[in-house]
Image (tube, coloured by chain):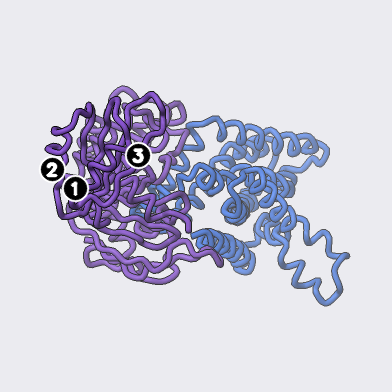
Chain colours: A purple, B blue
Amino acid sequence: MIHVENLTKYYNDFCAVDKINFDIKKGEILGLLGPNGAGKTTTLRMLTGYFMPTSGTIRVKDYMIDENLLEIKKLIGYLPESAPLYHNMLVYDYLDYVAELRGLDKDKKISRIRQLFELCGLDDIMHRSINELSKGLKQRVGLAHAMMYDPDILILDEPTSGLDPNQIAEIREIIREIGEEKTVILSTHILSEVEATCDRVVIINKGKIIADDLMENLKQSESQKHFIHLDFLNTEFQSVRDRLNEIEGVVNVERVNEEPNGPLGVRLTCKSALDLRETIYQTIKQTSWVLIEFHKETKTLETIFRELTKED
Amino acid sequence: MQQVIRICNKELKDYFISPIAYIVISIFLLVTGWFFFATFFYYNQADLRNFFDLLPITFSFFIPAVTMRLFSEELNVGSYEMLLTLPVTFNDILVGKFLAGVFFVAAALVPTLAYPICVAFMGQLDWGTVAGGYMGALLLGSAYTAVGLFASSLTRNQIIAFIVSMAICFTLTLIDKMLFFFPRPMLGVIGYIGADFHFKNIAKGIIDSRDILYFLSIIFIGLYGTHLAMEGKN
């Protein structure tokens, strides 16, 4: 669907995006992840034709961005960061204008606007001026703007920034709904958002792609170890360590909490291939320790993200 | 072309839905009406010379106030990003906005038709010069609109856009009255740059292709400058 090759963007001397390559397949929800100033927005702006790349190529379907920009624009619905709408227009008038620029004819226009009002929950506010709207409502109008033509590709730049938890959940719901048929690219620095909505993640830092994989692969593959977390009551760390260290496959036993009166938290580092939970359970059963918590720690996207974007 | 019309329509709607249009047009009519009729009866002549003589100066104030928001506001709010990522080209936007400005100037000139009608009741009015005057006014207005559009594309601050375009329009209006500051060999060229000189020719009823060409070049330079300024931003 979208093919990006050696895409580079310089602002004067500053290199915002440095030779990135990726492909996006039809029907994928791609999360573009990165710390602030990593080049997410710049990348999206180049994909939508707002910025011209310094070098490199973007191909959308069969169109090249420097030759058929207008055709590409017709395929893409774009919601820029914080939905900058004309603030002196009414919601209905604004969407009507967008529909006209999108080239919808009169009958189609009205039915499409009605459809979008329902999908984005705008029925109550269609006759209000945009500058009276709260941020969340504006974001929804922006979403309606992006989906006006029923575009094949939807590009959303930080679609949930600045919204309250209920609104975030609503917007995510809408994105997932759209993502069943369309290709969606969304950028964010909120990790849980990517975990909740995306199929695939591209992490960029300082203009370079440092990870590009499916969600599940990224969570599993990262390292050769995994962790098991245990909490005990009224138990000595010393004896726990000695006993558990004897189990084959346990690489390290460490104490994780230091509060004197709280439960004793222990983290076992295990070799990857083995699932030691049964052995550990059998071992603990033979002792008199009081076990109150026992779980395997899966690597969250957060830890992966931090490891990858950490400053050296 | 359709996109141009749609954008132009939207900009015109913006003017006339908000109070901007009515305030600006009222002030324009008040100023021109006052200066025209205040001295009209002293001269005791049934023509509109007085009105057209002052038009370049009033336009230098009035048109920057109309055009200052065209790009600055979009840049400031960020809506330009949403507009440009819709299936329109930059030239659609540019021409649409320019035409909206020109129509607005034309709309402000329509009520001034009351002046020649009044004058025609009082004496023998030469309608030929009046027609020439209005044509010149429209050309002058379009040229200043292009200049205003250029100034508006330079900055996201509307006040700066207003002042820059006013400065350029004033220079164009007054430069042929400042000729004594310039060295002798340049006089011809600089005299030719002045908008006032070309406008007066047309307002006298003399339609010369050189004058028309002059205004068309100013429009072209203004629009091309806007194109360059906005392209530099992306």
Residue B45: percent from left, percent from top: 76, 43
Tell me the quarter of the picture where residue A277 sits.
top left
The total number of labels drawn is 3
Q: Which mark is first along the chain, 3 or 1?
A: 1
Residue situated in front as seen by the camera: A17 or A300: A300
Q: Is residue B17 left or right of residue A224?
A: right
Tell me the quarter of the picture where residue B181 sits.
bottom right
Residue A247: give its label.
1
SS under mark 1: loop
Residue A255: give its label.
3
Residue A279: give its label.
2
The residue at the point 26 percent across, 66 percent down is A63
Residue situated in front as seen by the camera: B20 or A291: A291
Residue A77 visible (yes or no): no
CA distance separating discs 3 and 2: 20 Å
Which chain letter matches label 2? Answer: A
Whether residues under marks 2 and 1 lie with C-beta atoms below 8 angstroms apart, the answer is yes
Same chain for the residues at labels 1 and 3, yes or no? Answer: yes
The residue at the point 59 percent across, 64 percent down is B221
Above or below, A223 relative to A264: below
Instruction: Please name the amino acid that badge 3 sits on.
Output: Arg
CA distance separating discs 1 and 3: 17 Å
The residue at the point 14 percent across, 33 percent down is A286
